[in-house]
Each structure stands twice: as C-alpha cells, then as structure tokens.
Image: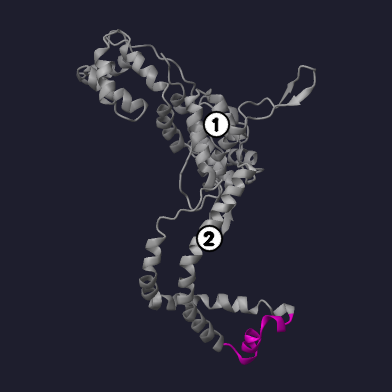
Amino acid sequence: MATLRWPVCVCMLVSALGLAGTGAGSSKPDDTDDKTPKPWYLKPVIRPPLPVGAAKSANPIDAFIAAQHQTKGLKAAEAADRRTLLRRVHLDLVGIPPSPAEQEAFLQDQSSDAYEKVVDRLLASEQHGVRYARHWLDVLRYADVDEGMIAAPGIHLWRQWVINALNSDMPYNQFVCAQLTGCRTTARTEVSVLGFQERVAPRPDDLFALGFLARGAVVHGDKEIQELPIAAVETVSTAFMGLTVGCAKCHDHEYDPIKQRDFYAMKALFDPLVLRKVTLANPAEVTAHGHALDALDKKLAAVQTPILELIAPYKKKLFDERVAQLPADVRAVILKPEKQRPPLRRRSPTITSRSCASTWARSWGSCRKRIVKSTKRWSMASSNWRKPKQI
C-alpha cells in the first residue's frame, strides 16, 4: 500500500544550516556548558519501544494511544462501521465525501484488502495532491490574492507546482531544493557521452517553484519594501526547520541556541535574490492577448467617455479656482500655452494639477451622488466584462 512520507519531514535541516550549534556563528563568546541539556526539538528523532499488550490493533500508533488510555482510565470508542470508515478516509485523503456509488462498491467488497484498495485509489487521485498541497501552502505562506505582492499575477503557478509535486511523489529533498534554487538537485554539470562537461539544464516547470521565494517581495504604497531576504529567512526557517528565528534580527534568542549573527549569516545567502519577470507565452498567445486588450479598451472607452464628459466641468472649475489663488506672475506662467513657455517651465501645469488634488478630493463628495446616479446604467451594462487573463 502506498504511504504518505512528506507530512513528517519538516524539521530536519537545522544542523545543516548551523543554527543548532552553539559555537560557530555566535555574536558573543559562548558561555554554555557541554553538559547543558539540548532542547527536545533539536534532539535526533528516535523510534521509541512499543508499549506491550496495550492494544490489539496492528497499527503501532494505536499502542501508544491505548497506553495513555490505560494510564488515565479511559476506554476507547468502538470500531467504526464500514460506511463511517470510508467517509473518514475520503475526507482525510481527498477532502471530498464518497459518492453513493463508491459507498455501495466498498460495502459490497468483502475482500480482506478492501480498505487498502480504497486508500491506494485515493492516494493515486489528483485530488489527493490538491488536498495535501493546501497544508503545505499554508506553511509556505501562499496566498491567491495579495495587493502588495509583486509576484501575485503568476503566483498560482507555484501553487500548481506544489500540487504536481505531491501527485508525482517527488522526493522531499528535491521538493525543498527546487523551491530554494529552481533545480531539483545540486548537480550543475554532467559528463556527456563524448566525455565533455555539459551544463545540466533545469526542468522548465521547476521555475515555478521559485514562487516560494518570490512571494516575499511586497510593496507598501508605491515603494517596494526591500525585505525579500529577511522574508526568505523567516519562511525557510519556519517551513523547513520548524523554528521561528525572526527575533534574532535584533537580538540573540534567550532560550533557543540561535544568535543574531546566525540570522544575518543565513540572510546573506538570500541577499543576491532579484525578481525578474519571465514571459511564458509564445508569440501567438502574446498577439492574441494584445487583441483581447484592444477589444476591452474599446468597450471601456464607450463607458468612460460619457463619465469623463460629465466630470470635466467640475475638474475645470476646481482647477481654475486653485490657479486663481496663485500670485499673478505664477498664474501667468501656468495659463500660458505650453509651446510658448521655456523648457524649464513646462512642468508647471503638472505640478499645479497635483496641488489641486486635495481640493478635488474635498469637493468630490458633493458631486459623487450625481455621477453615480448618471453612470449606474453604464456600470450595469459593463458588469459582465472581464480583463483578459494575464499570460
């Protein structure tokens, strides 16, 4: 029967990145003693002995649960009936309850491996990857919609990559490596059949895995926040190391063996990151997308032109009132046709137009109701329009 490997492999990269050690990378002399007990979450995973005689189930996990039941004087619930068991495994593996036909087929199957066959079928289902990718994407800080995320238009490609990785049973080390480097392995060259060293080209679809790093680039207002390396450190440590190291930006951790120097040493790995846009469409698709945008612009023009004509008198009135408040010599420059002004003064109307913005905003409320009422029929007519999907 197929097995689930990934959900239990998220905390094993600590020592590889040097955050578990107490000597190297410390921002101050290490005053810890070798006899100081290591935190339980940094100790190697071991297989404990099974409690003897605690449970009759063949599943070793049930033995630990039954031992705790005995300790606390609790009694386990009765075994679930076949219909309930089928519903539970469906909701767990694919997130969708079984159909009536699937229920009847399972109830009619009296073979000893009927349940195992259901599990194998669900694990082979495409929906299984969708179901368990949701857990991974939550850990990896995925979001479909984020106004501040620069990579938002193509971030869904990373989501689909994670789903495909689960469904294809990608090994965990390749899953991590692809999202950090865009390549599934560390091999960058190989020897050809003629004996020459050749560069190993990464799989094209693994480019989408870099959405894991790209999602950390955000903008606030009109400015990009240069915190992509910091976001990478925090997400990598949380998702793949099971540790939160964000506090080490400012100080050594008080209880964890994580130093401020360790944080910035790890950040240095991600400092060279630079976002770049990649066109994935072929020339025909780019041309078709341009035609779709042109058609949309024509439809919008038919709606927006009457709106602009309606608000034009208000904008002109506000602009004239604002200009009238300026000194006469400045007003003369502003009102002079652009071609008659010296080159250095041709920006003045633009600057004045921006200075009118606050007055326009204050006066907008008085005419907003009229504009909304006049444009309601146009809004209803255009409500079914959709911008072409980005390529």
Question: Which dot, 2 or 1, sits closer to the camera?
Answer: 2
* Quarter of the figure that contains the C terminus: top right
Left or right for 182, reference 7: right
Q: Where is residue 324 in the image (x, y as percent from the top left)?
A: 55, 89
Q: Where is residue 358 in the image (x, y as percent from the top left)?
A: 49, 76
Left or right for 379, reference 286: left
The quarter holding residue 84 reads top left
38 within the magenta span: no
User: SS of the residue at dot 2?
Assistant: helix
Residue range corresponding to the magenta coloring: 325-342
Three-letter amino acid code of the residue under disc 1 = Thr
Q: In this view of the protein, which residue sits in the foreground, 338 or 282?
A: 282
Three-letter amino acid code of the residue under disc 2 = Asp
In the picture of the structure, the residue carrying the numbered disc 1 is: 32
Q: Is residue 100 visible?
A: yes
The residue located at (29%, 19%) in the rendering is 65
Q: Earlier in the sequence, mark 2 or mark 1?
A: 1
Compared to residue 199, the image places residue 281 above or below, namely below
In the picture of the structure, the residue carrying the numbered disc 2 is: 297
Q: How many marks?
A: 2
Query: Mark 2 touching mark 1, by CB under 8 A?
Result: no
